[in-house]
Amino acid sequence: MTSAFECPECGNPRPMVGSCPYCNSNLLPLLHEDTAVFNLKQGSPTVEEAVDRLTHYLRRASEVGIKAIILIHGYGSSGEGGRIKSGVHQALENNYFSDRVDEYYFGEQVAFGGEAYHRLLRRRPGLKSHLKHFKEGNAGMTVLLLGNESRIA
């Protein structure tokens, strides 16, 4: 799979956040697609750390022009929904990210062929390849649609 981001200095693939691992450039990466996947549960952060990471990621996503994010927060090993998922959902419902997130869809709402699925595809056709993970809804993911303009704080 090709990287969604490229270093503007050396041309190598690089992550959206942080410096280029090849040339250490801190310039904003070049964007290859308008959708990014962000694994928020990687590294087993606390809820507070996860929300802080998401805040930082959303700022950078706005700066580089990302329009949609597939957010992987997991469902939790207890089978009742994880703390990170609950913390992120609560932050979204309380408009904590309203300066950058226009709409959000919890994975369990985005079953293949459903109303939310078709609404997402009409708004962002580029999501089609990513939504294959939502065949019967995926409670471990959330789709974030970002604002049309960069709103840097």
Image (cartoon, helix red, strand yellow):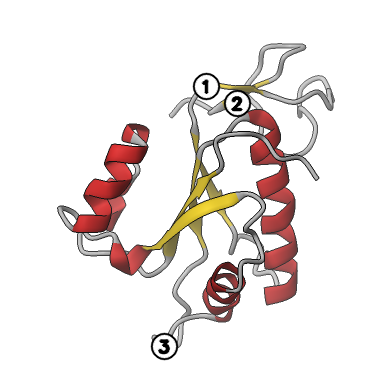
Kindly state the secondary structure of the residue where label 2 is placed. strand
Kind of residue sitting beneath label 1: His
- Badge 2 vs badge 1, beta-carbon distance below 8 Å: yes
Q: Quadrant of the C terminus?
A: top right
Disc 1 crowd, CA 10 A, few/some/many (<14, 14-19, 20+): few
Mark drawn on residue 5? 2
Kind of residue sitting beneath label 2: Phe
- Please give the name of the residue rendered at 62% of the width and 71% of the height, measured from the top-left corner: 91
Q: CA distance from mark 2 to mark 1?
A: 6 Å
For residue 30, above or below residue 99 = above
> Can see residue 54?
yes
According to the picture, the residue beneath numbered tag 1 turns out to be 32
Kindly state the secondary structure of the residue where label 1 is placed. loop
Kind of residue sitting beneath label 3: Glu
> Can see residue 46?
no
Disc 3 crowd, CA 10 A, few/some/many (<14, 14-19, 20+): few
Q: CA distance from mark 3 to mark 2?
A: 35 Å
